[in-house]
Image: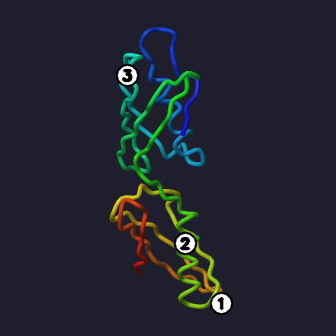
């Protein structure tokens, strides 16, 4: 992920600009779910990487910010996996459709979760007869693997 034009003209980098850009760069579809972004106030421009902390959907995470490069751009590495409910619902749908042999419609909430063991999504399944069923999907590892629980 790349942040552009975030340097100041002094010998130090003004990382308040980086802090303001992180939500949009990290989660362009959900920047409102990134809060409490904190980067070092000033960093010597010879230092290549800094670490910022922030809250994503209520979980504190750390991101590394590397740069600037020759174009005054920075690279952002979240060092975590973020799971979007829309993508998760598609995977759950495929698994259920394959197992049950019928088409289902599935919606899960909240919008995102950090891939952290034990995090839950609440899902609503509407079967081909219009019946609504509820289940939870639990994240089981840092890679976003999941299990369906009732």
Label 3 belongs to which residue? 47
Distance CA(mark 3)–CA(mark 2): 41 Å
Instruction: Please give the name of the residue rendered at 45% of the width and 18% of the height, measured from the top-left corner.
Output: 14
Q: Which mark is residue 103?
A: none
Instruction: Please give the name of the residue rendered at 55% of the width and 70% of the height, measured from the top-left corner.
Output: 89
Q: Which mark is residue 129?
A: 1
Q: How many marks?
A: 3
N-terminal label among 2 and 1? 2
Residue nearest the viewer, comparing 142 with 128: 142
N-terminal label among 3 and 2? 3
- Above or below, 22 relative to 67: below
Badge 1 crowding class, 10 Å Cα cut-off, few under 14, some 14 to 19, many 20 or more, is few
Q: Secondary structure at mark 1?
A: loop
Instruction: Please give the name of the residue rendered at 37% of the width and 16% of the height, measured from the top-left corner.
Output: 44
| Quadrant of the frame with the C terminus | bottom left
Instruction: Please give the name of the residue rendered at 45% of the width and 67% of the height, measured from the top-left corner.
Output: 121
Q: Secondary structure at mark 2?
A: helix
**Residue 60 left/right relative to 83:** left
**Residue 138 left/right relative to 101:** left
Q: Are marks 2 and 1 in contact (CB under 8 Å)?
A: no
């Amino acid at each position: 992920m790349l942040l552009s034009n975030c340097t100041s003209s002094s010998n130090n980098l003004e990382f308040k600009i980086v802090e303001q850009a992180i939500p949009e760069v990290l989660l362009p579809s959900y920047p409102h779910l990134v809060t409490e972004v904190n980067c070092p106030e000033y960093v010597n421009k010879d230092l290549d990487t800094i670490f910022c902390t922030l809250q994503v959907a209520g979980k504190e995470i750390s991101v590394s910010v590397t740069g600037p490069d020759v174009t005054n751009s920075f690279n952002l590495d979240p060092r975590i996996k973020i799971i979007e409910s829309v993508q998760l619902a598609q995977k759950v749908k495929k698994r259920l459709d394959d197992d049950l042999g019928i088409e289902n419609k599935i919606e899960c909430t909240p919008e995102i979760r950090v891939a952290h063991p034990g995090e839950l999504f609440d899902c609503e399944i509407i079967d081909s007869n219009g019946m609504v069923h509820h289940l939870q999907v639990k994240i089981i590892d840092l890679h976003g693997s999941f299990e369906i629980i009732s």
